[in-house]
Amino acid sequence: MTIGVDDDESAFSRLEDNKGLAESWLRICGRLKGEVGEVEYRTWLTQIALGPIDGDEITLLLPTRFLRDWVRSQYGDRLNELWHNEVPSLRRVELQVARAGDPAPLPVTEVAAAPASAPLPTEDSSPASRPIAEVRSDLVTALDSRFTFDTFVVGKPNEFAYACARRVAEKPSSVGFNPLFLYGGVGLGKTHLMHAIGAELVKSGNVSVAYMSAEKFMYRFIAAIRSQSTIEFKEQLRSVDVLMIDDLQFLIGKDNTQEEFFHTFNALVDAGRQIVVSADKSPSDLSGLEDRLRTRLGCGMVADIHATTFELRISILEAKAAASGVVVPAKVLEFLAHKITSNVRELEGALNRLIAHANLFGRPVTLEATQDVLHDILKAHDRRVTIEEIQKKVAEHWNIRLTDMSSARRARNVARPRQVAMYLAKQLTSRSLPEIGRKFGNRDHTTVMHAVNRVTELMERDAAFAEDVELMRRMLES
Ligand SMILES: Nc1ncnc2c1ncn2[C@@H]1O[C@H](COP(=O)(O)OP(=O)(O)OP(=O)(O)O)[C@@H](O)[C@H]1O
């Protein structure tokens, strides 16, 4: 069908006019950007160029087959709909792979996002024409725009992994860095670094990046087997420039999926594409993965993210607090960094709760408020320090015999450390004063109370002594 004046005169004259067409495309891009969000838009849609129009069909051009298939499966319907809204006589949007000399995509900066909440009028508002933002990808998980290199705080435990990730983002597939294998405990930033690599590559140009969890890889693979579309699945995966698979340990015991991953891995590396993988253990410790896969995974760069240090936790908290715009006093940050040592995710969760609380009630963040608001989290993180541990550490530190913790000796060089141990027992355990007294040679609870008051008083007067006691406390808590 050709477009005639009778069909839609204004549309026809617009189609005759290239400028009008470009403006329509700009509006459609703005609309899509508003609907799918900046990251998804940059990842997939900035690569589309406006091709020729022929009758009731307009052609959009994509740089690779993978992208064409991807855009067709994920955004095809919506593109049809948006074009039809702009030019009602258009019936079809054809997606093609661009050839040399074809027009270039629109510069990203030209496209201003139109709010998704104000949809263009459509003829059909059935579920089939739902906005793109709801269409979830089967093959690829969208990158999280919060996880960039800029927002990743670097310290001793993660500097090597960070440097490797940077290197891969700058120069994918360089010798010695393919695959990049990132490993470390839960919530220490592996996913963050992978998304940062993806975001950087997407920003830098024409690179197709696929990121997905190993779990998703498996489900996609199974779905492809069921729907007899394994060839397409393989083709799609094998046509990306960079493939990132998160939490590979999930494939332990899933032999068929491992096998598929192994072949995909080989096909990509042999074709000079980059692979990035994360797991909770090093390749050699991932027992349960096939030997040949473990060997290949260890062939490139293996980078470990270590548990956080107190200093790194403080830096992360400072950065996140600053980004929130809420003033969080240094002593609150220190308190959190002392208390929540397990992983960054929990640390971040605690800080976010404090910030939300401060915003909601418009109250300043204080140490007291922190203890109150985070009561449950802090309780769960309370390390169970025993009175015996306290006595042992204090005796070592002040160089007295352990038996003197319960002896009747009253010499100052023995009595003072004993009082400190009682004070710390009160601070760091949930034992009552009589219980503590019993552990210190059956002393009375009033003796313990006296010790606690005396140490508190001394700490206020003597900074060096206070520092010593604080140090003890930190050693016992960490
Ligand atoms: N160095 C860091 N700087 C800033 N944020 C960090 C850092 N490390 C971790 N985070 C944050 O902590 C959270 C958890 O990180 P992430 O999801 O990357 O951990 P992971 O190692 O992939 O965990 P899992 O093993 O559960 O998959 C994220 O919100 C991330 O942004």
Image (cartoon, rainbow, N blue to C red):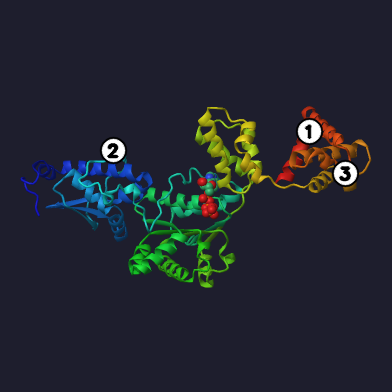
Give the mark nearest the N terminus, 1 or 2. Answer: 2
Checking the image for residue 186, the label placed there is none
Secondary structure, mark 1, is: helix
Residue 89 is left or right of residue 476, and the answer is: left
* Crowd tier of the residue under label 3, counting other residues whose Cα lies within 10 Å: few below 14, some 14–19, many 20 or above: many
- For mark 2, does the 10 Å Cα neighbourhood hold few (<14), some (14 to 19), or many (20 or more) residues? few
Q: Amino acid at mark 3?
A: Met
Specify whether residue 23 is in view: yes
Helix, strand, or loop for circle 2? loop
Quadrant including the N terminus: bottom left
Residue that label 1 marks: 464
Say which mark, if any, is on residue 118.
2
Pick the residue in front: 208 or 37: 37
- Observer-nearest of 326 and 205: 326
Observer-nearest of 125 and 149: 125
Q: Within 8 Å of ligand 1, the CB of disc 2? A: no
Percent x, y of residue 446:
86, 34
User: In screen coordinates, is 233 left or right of 180?
Assistant: left
| Label at residue 405 | 3
Q: What amino acid is at disc 1?
A: Ala
Q: Amino acid at mark 2?
A: Ala
Res 162 visible: no
Q: Which residue is at 57% across, 46% downward? A: 346
So how many labels did they put on this image?
3
For the point 53% across and 62% down, the residue is: 249
Q: Which quadrant of the figure has residue 348? A: top right
